[in-house]
Image (spheres, rainbow, N blue to C red):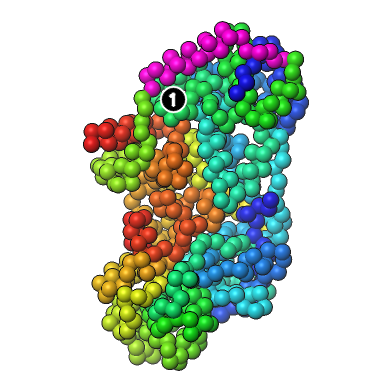
Amino acid sequence: MQNSYLPQKAVIEDIIQESPDTKTFTLSLSGDKADSILKYKPGQFLMLSLPGYGEAPFTFASLPDPNGGFQISVRRIGALTKALHTLKIKAIVGVRGPYGNTFPLAKMKHKDLLFVAGGCGIAPLRSLIQYALKQRKAYGKIEIIYGCRTPKDRFYKEEMELWEKNKDTQTHLTVDEPDPTWHGERGVVCVLFPKIKLNPKTSFVFLCGPAIMIKFAIRDLLKLGFREENIYASLERHMQCGTGKCGHCYIKDKYVCRDGPNFSYSEMKQLEIES
Amino acid sequence: MKRLFIIKENLKILVKNLKKECDEFIAPKREHLDDIIFGDTKVDGGELLEYEGNSVISPRAFLLPQSEPLFEIKSARESDLVPIQDKKRRIFYGVRPCDIKALALMRRFFLDAVVDVPYQEKMEHSIFIALACNTLCSAEAFCCELDAGPVAQEGFDLQLVAGENGFLVDVGTKKGKHIVEGHKTLFTNAPARDAKQANALFKDMAKGCRRIDYKKVAQAMRDNKVAESVWDDIALRCVVCSGCTTLCPTCSCFRVVDRLSHGKGVRLRYCDGCPYAGFTRMAGDNAPLPLHKDHIRRFFEHKLNVDVARYGAPSCVGCARCIRTCPGNISIRKFIEAVAGQTKAE
C-alpha cells in the first residue's frame, strides 16, 4: 500500500494575480495518481506541498479542465503561501487528494441556488458555481452574492462579468471600503440580502467566507425563511493530514477534513458551531 | 484460549532465541535514574523479565515516535520525494495490559478509513508479548475500571502471567502460536494450581474496582452537563506542559514539518498536543477555539466523549501516567468520578 502522505508532482502552468494578496495558480498533473485526483467534486480540497515550507489544505477553485489541469487560489498569509507566491510558471509543487466531502449535488438539482461568499471564500464556491452553470438548465434561479474588503480584493473579475451578463443568473456585489472606482453597494454581504428574489423555502444556500460572515449571514438567512437543512457552509480548520489522523480539525465526533469541510447548518447546530 | 507454562530458565532461553529472530527487542529496563523505560535490548541486553509497576513512557514511542520521517525529500526544488519504508521486525516484550489495550485502540484508529501506512508497516512487523500485573502499579491507576488490566483480554500475541515457578502463557494470535510452535520444548501445559492462583489474584485485584458507565459519562459531556466552573478550574491548573499528551499511550495527534539542509531533507511528523494554543489556530491567526480552557477541554472530550461516540468506548486505559506527571494535579480519574457521580445523582 502506498504512503498516503506522499504527494505527487504538479506543474504550475499559469499564475494570475487575482488581488493584491492572492494569486490563482493553474496546476497540471501527470503520473499514475493524476486521474484519481482529477475526479474531485466541487467543495473538495487537496493538500499542497512545497518541500521545505510544508503542506496546507487548499480548495479546488475550478472544475478540472480538459487538459488535466485545475485552479487553486492562494492568499499570501503564512510561510507556505508566501513561498508559493514567489514561484514562477513551470515550477513544481506537491499535491495529494482529493479530500473531504462535496456539496449535496443530487439534492440541489432543479432547485434555486444562492451563493454567499466573502473575500477568498469565493474560491470553494466557484467550482460549484461552474458546476451549476455548466448544466444551467438543471437548476432554477441562481443568485450570487459576493462581498470583499475593497474593489481591488475582488477575485475572478472577468469570469464574474460573464456571470453578471447571464440573464438567468443574478450577481450582487458589495465592498466594505469603496474606492473612487466603485459605484456599487457598500457593506457586509448581509446588506444585499433584501435583493434576493428566490423562494427561501425551497432554495439551497452555499456559504463560504470569514467565520464572522458565516455566523451573521446564516442568522439573517434563517430570518428570511431559508431552511437550516438547505444552508451549507464550507468551513475552515487547522489541518495537517487531510485524512482524519492528525487530530487538529475534529469538532465533536466529526473530522472537518473527512466528514466536511461542507456542513449543513443543521449539522453545524449538532456540532454546536456557528462557523 | 489455550494456556501454557514456561519456567523462568526457559523464558531466558526463549528471549535469547527471540532476539535472534528480530531486528529490535524492545523490553523494559532500568535507566540510570532507576526508572523503568522501554528500550532496544537486542545487543546490549539488560531487559527485565519481570518488574514492578509500569514504564514511565509507554511503548507507543516505538510505533508513533516523538518524531518520525514520513518520506525523504531528495530535491525540494523538483519536489522529488521518496518513500521511507520501515520493515524492522520488532518484538515488544513485557508490555503491561493497559499499554496493550492502548496499542489496540491506536491500531483501530490508524487503520480506520484511510490507512496510516507508516503505522501499519510497523504494526505488521511487530510482535507483542504482554506481561500481566500482579500488583496495582500506583494508587492513581484505574485500569481495571476500563477493562485494561491487570490482565489483557486481547491485543497481545503472547501474554505472560507470573506465577511461583514460572509464567502462565496465553496465546492470543497466530503470531503467538508461531512462537510457541517454534520453541515447543520450552513450554509445558499450565499446572492447574498456578492457573487457579493467578485467577484468584486477578479476582482479588478487581475487588475494589468500581464499574463506571462510560456511555453515561460521554452523554453528560455531550449534553454540556459538566459545569463551566470545572473547565475553568482545569484551565487554571493546566500549565500547558503537554506532559499528559506526551505520556498518554493512546494520544496520537501529530504535526508535520519539513527539515531541509541544502535543498534535501525529510518531511517529519512529530507528536503534537491539544493543550497548545496553536493546535487549532490557522494561518492568519484565525482561531476557532481562542480560550485556553477550550484547548485542554479537547483532551478530555476526545478521550471520554468523542471516542465513545466513534468507537463505543473511551480511549483512556487508566494507566494514570497523565495524573502522576501533571504539575497542576489534574486527574482524569477524579474528573470521570465527578461526572459519573453527577449522572448517578440524576
According to the picture, the residue beneath numbered tag 1 turns out to be B144
A252 relative to A32 in the view: left or right = left
The stretch drawn in magenta includes residue B168: no
B29 relative to A30 in the view: left or right = left
The stretch drawn in magenta includes residue B194: yes
Residue A253: x and y in percent read: 42, 50
Residue at 63%, 24% (x, y): give it: B171
Residue B42: x and y in percent read: 71, 26
Instruction: Assign the N terminus of chain B to one quadrant of the image.
Output: top right
Report the label total.
1
Q: Chain of mark 1?
A: B
- The quarter holding residue B194 reads top right
Residue at 37%, 84% (x, y): give it: A172
Q: Is residue B273 above or below residue A137?
A: above
Residue A199: x and y in percent read: 32, 80
Residue B176: x and y in percent read: 67, 27
Q: Which residues are magenta?
A: B186-209
Nearer to the camera, B199 or A153: B199
Could you tell me if residue A79 is visible in this image?
Answer: no
- The quarter holding residue B229 reads top left
